[in-house]
Image: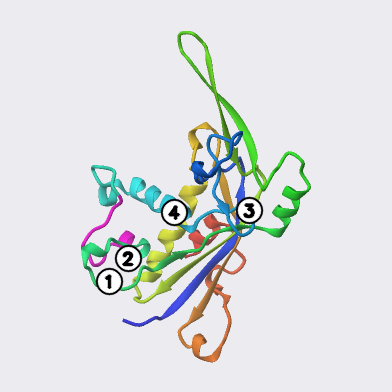
Amino acid sequence: MELIKNYLIRGKIVCETGLHIGGLSEALKIGGTDSPVIMNRMTNKPYIPGSSIKGKMRSLLELKHGNLWLHPDGKVHSCKDLNCNLCVSFGRSATDDVKSGPTRLIVRDSHPTLETIEKWDNNDDVLHGTEVKGENVLNRLTSSANPRFIERVPAGSAFGFEMVFSIYDPADEDRLKLVFEAMTLLEDNYLGGYGSRGSGKITFSDIELLEKISDDYKTGKDWHPYEKVSGADSVHEILERL
């Protein structure tokens, strides 16, 4: 087994509604929100962990292909099938001891764009890149309210994202489609928490699919466009051409 090429998938994640990916409540001071978002400790700005993106994409694929990958107990799918497209692409438990090579998909943490940070800094209602959304839980019999306050990244915020998909086997070319299938599923679902109450709708925009073959790492040649999808910049357009 040897590396044939790498694909780079990059672009923006645009928040169509407020986005909540939870941080540590223990770190809150008195007067803070009930449910804070995760923050970059160096910049004190929100970010989207790669594990959150990858985990949600994987879970949506497991639900869509339930007859293949949905565990009856709801656990993350992991199996000993050498050619399992999900496990090869997204990873499997080390305890399965299957020599199918490295996990093909790497998902980086996503950080806010400079334009988004500027918008946050110029908005008096946004503090450290977040807004506070108030909610009430009503007692069905007495109508008494139990208020709670959820921290969210405001709608309209954009985060740069980057994924790398490695090709070690010709069959991996078809597995690349699985990544874009998962991205289309995510656009029609939600990312993070409180999705059933309006949060977490996102869109992937300004997408580029680039490639770098094995020899490019010897010559120093940088990423170059994958001609097969030239001109396509949405997950749907790219998936149709793959």
Report which residue position mark 3 lands on.
44
Question: From the viewer's perspective, is 80 left or right of 183?
Answer: left
Q: Which residues are magenta?
A: 76-88
Q: CA distance from mark 3 to mark 4?
A: 30 Å
Question: Which of marks 3 and 1 precedes in the sequence?
Answer: 3
Q: CA distance from mark 1 to mark 2?
A: 7 Å
Question: From the viewer's perspective, is 125 left or right of 223?
Answer: right
Report which residue position mark 1 lands on.
100
Q: Residue furthest top?
A: 142
Relative image position of residue 53 (x, y in whole percent): 48, 54
Between marks 2 and 3 in the image, the one whose residue lies nearer the viewer? 3
* Residue at the spot 49% in from the left edge and 59% down from the top edge: 240
Q: Is residue 68 above or below residue 212?
A: above
Q: Residues within 10 Å of mark 1 (few under 14, many from 20)?
A: some
Report which residue position mark 2 lands on.
88
Report which residue position mark 4 lands on.
182
Between marks 2 and 4 in the image, the one whose residue lies nearer the viewer? 2
Q: Residue furthest front?
A: 30
